[in-house]
Image (cartoon, helix red, strand yellow):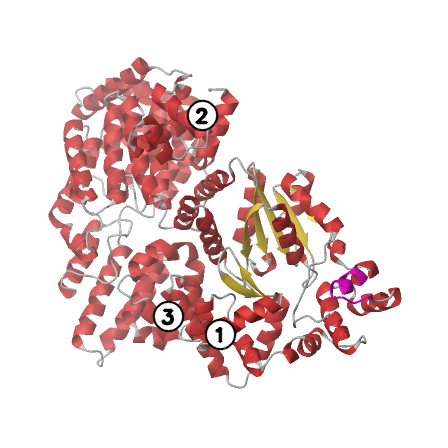
Amino acid sequence: MTHPAGFHPVLKRQLIREQLEYAFHYPLTLVIAAMGYGKTVAARDFIEGMQAEHVWLDVESDETPAHIIWESLTRKLAAGKPEIGDRLKTLGFPISAMDRNRVFDLLEEWAYLSNKVLVIDDYHFAKAPELDFLLEKLVRRKIKGLHIMILSRTSPAMNIQDLKLKGYCHQLESSLFELSGADIKQYFRLFGVDISNATAGQVREITEGWITSVYLVCQGYLKTGRLEAGLDLRELISKTIMAHYSGGERSLLMSLAALDSFTLPQAEYVTGNKAAAEIIQKLSRDSSFIRLDAQSGKYMMHNIFSEYLRGLLETEPDQAAVFDLYRRDGEWQITHGYTLSGLRQLLKARAYDLILEEFEQPDISRRITRMFDPAVKDIVNLFEQIPLEVKYRHPIGYITFIDFYLARVDLKKGARLLAEIEAYYERDNITPPDLKRQITGEIELVKAFIHFNDLRKTHACCARAHELLDGKSRIANPDMIFTYGCPSTLFLYHRKAGDLLGLVEFVEQNYSCYEDLSGGCGKGFESLIRAEYCLESGELDQAELHAYKAIYQAETLEQVSMVICASFVLVRISAARGKYGEAKGLLDELAVRVAESNNPIFLDALDLCYGYLGGITNDPLNFAQWLQTGEMKQDIIFYQGLGFNYLVHARYLLLEGNYLKLEAFCGELHRIFSPFNNLLGHLQAYILDAIVKNQLYGPEIAEKALQQALALGRADGIIMPFAEYGQFINTILSAVADREKNDPYLDRLLKAVSHYRSNLEAAGRNEEAVFRLTEREMEILKLLLEGKQNREIAGILFIAEVTVKKAISSIYRKLGVSSRAAAVRKTIELKLI
């Protein structure tokens, strides 16, 4: 019996199959064995034989970053479940606790009412601690129906022993994959050859039971009729596989070794071989060393084979031709939407100019916002390897990177980089005047970020940039997050006592410069900041008027961050009027709008709004899990509202009566608010400190803390924060007012505090209210239990799909959950239906 070179039948091994069947009983199954022992073949044969719903994810090259792996995973999920995959892709690789929870909720929806297997092959290539951490958290979440199988040469950096002890993990012993003499006889028989026990023993001795080596020895035996001992793996591949390919086939295979995986059009483009598709399809049919991944539509080479070919590629005399392969692959990937992978290939090619040219593309600033945030370390590493003279040859691209660096990595170092390029072009006499003017204008605009919460300094930079750039920047764009994830712009920008009204008036007169430069980023800011000022001053009617005006303006250019802030104003107004149901309804409507964007920064801001309202209304279910636990990262400049998140966490501690922890946390709050002198943050921290000291040490000590808050509030006529804590500070404030008679400011405060407290007392707190669903919500919940999607529910009930979305947001809030699967689980637990 003759077989084509590379023919590789599957040896069915019952013991391995029996062990793999445990995968459906554990969240995690580990298959750890050295290269070439048949892990992948055994797992694929098992999964396909079981006809299990699965996603197969290959980690394609050494030290693949977590965000590249994430990108591959989300694409595969999107192929079968677009609404899940696309949302996961937009969220990006989750670093923070809140993003992890959102990702886990989506994976729970994916696995809901089924048995899904996520196979991660060649996991040893990842070397990404953040991925180990994420997967261990996911395993411990123990999502029903979700099973992870990791195939690796080495054990992942997780607490495997603990996972095993607690029943989360099953591991296959590596010895299972070593072929015995009987296995070797059976394997040779698959090629139509019967060998003796003695010959099988010799093969076992030569190969040590390594199935790839057994396969190669078998190929030699089929051709010569004898066993060849002493050959290393490279020699075996050369003699038994490569020797049977034509010169053209060998040349193509070497070229393809520069790629981790490839489609047929990609292979043709990168190699420049118009016959590549035909050759690859032939080789794939004849050999298991090249296979097609049906889920991704990409071809991949077996690791042993690709490592052999890369060894040949590294010794290729014409290394310029090898770099050209990397360059062409980088160009291909960028053109087809794989920007991060493409940039990595361009770096391998040392095509530094092409990398900078990519950062000069007209839409790059928008793509940075959407794609590069999950890959900050890799983008920084990329630029660290580019020579300085190349960066200065592409000033706009380099300034774009510096802008990225300032916002996401290090403000001070970013400012130094900006100063260096500014000094370089001040000395330069070669650059054409028009380009030099543009460079100077973009530098001035980026400088504005250095002073980001000093609006007068920011405006000075923007005004100079506006003049130099004729009102249009290549770096700023309307997709930038104007509010930095904070639901209150005054919280960000009020930094000088007694200047609150002056700040608002300054914005109203001067903001248009940045709006013009960015093409509309922050549209509606003038109306919003006036609305926030009126709210903090207790002028509710005026605040409402300007908030709606801000929303209408922001919606014209889809400025979701501004809509969130203006809606938050309306929520606080409704709460101040005692209309708590209306306030929650406004947030539920906002949740539908934010869900459409699926932007993690906006989702964080929405959580902050819900949590803040929960602090006012004494409702712990309004706080997202991450705001309850305080699991937050302080080293991320751009996210989580620049300290506002800590304020909401403090409100949760207060609600829980955890006064000792809150006392210590108040000092931490002042430290967090100090870098940008967020006075509204300091004011609330002083109020919280007064509440804690009243509980722990009595009113006399509490009054001293409250006086610090009053000093800040009095300077700008601030009322609302005191009113929102009215139920806690009414007695202390009354004592202060009794001693300081005829103080108009204190009189206003007492009136607002008393009114707010009365509203809360009138509303009371119904412990069962959180589960009291409307008749319509019950109808929708029943359909959710049946697995119906939003569009189907809308059709069955003859209502608009947006109405369904709003109702589902309300159901989630009332049940204290954040996903469809969790809502169903909670419904079953509580026997609501």
Front-lying residue, 804 or 475: 804
Query: Which one is earlier in the sequence, the residue at label 2 or at label 3?
Result: 3
The residue type indicated by label 1 comes to: Ala
Taking the view exactly as shown, the residue that stands out farthest to the right is 198
Q: Residues within 10 Å of mark 1 (few under 14, many from 20)?
A: many
Question: Which residue shows up at 67% across the image and 63% down it?
Answer: 35
Q: Vertical placement of 538 versus 16: above or below? A: above
773 drawn magenta: no
How far separated are the C-alphas under marks 2 and 3? 52 Å
Q: x%, y% of residue 771?
A: 42, 20
| Residue bearing the label numbered 3 | 355
Eyeballing the image, is 402 above or below 645?
A: below
Say which of marks 1 and 2 sits in front: 1
Image x and y of residue 426, in percent:
23, 74
- Residue under label 1, please give it: 276
Secondary structure under tag 2 reads: helix
Residue count near mark 3 (Cα–Cα under 10 Å), binned few <14, some 14–19, many ≥20 = many
Quarter of the image holding residue 136? top right
Tell me the CA gap for discs 3 and 1: 27 Å
Residue, disc 2:
656
Q: Which residues are magenta?
A: 185-194
Q: Specify the label residue 231 is tagged with.
A: none
Reading the chain from its start, which is encountered first: label 1 or label 2?
1
Q: Is residue 314 above or below residue 803?
A: below
Amino acid at pointer 2? Glu
Residue 612 showing in the rendered view: no
> On the rendered image, what quadrant is the N terminus found in?
bottom right
Where residue 38 sits: x, y (%)? Answer: 68, 59
Q: Are marks 2 and 3 in contact (CB under 8 Å)?
A: no
Query: At numbered mark 3, what does the secondary structure look like: helix, strand or loop?
Result: helix
How far is disc 1 from disc 2 in space, using C-alphas? Answer: 66 Å
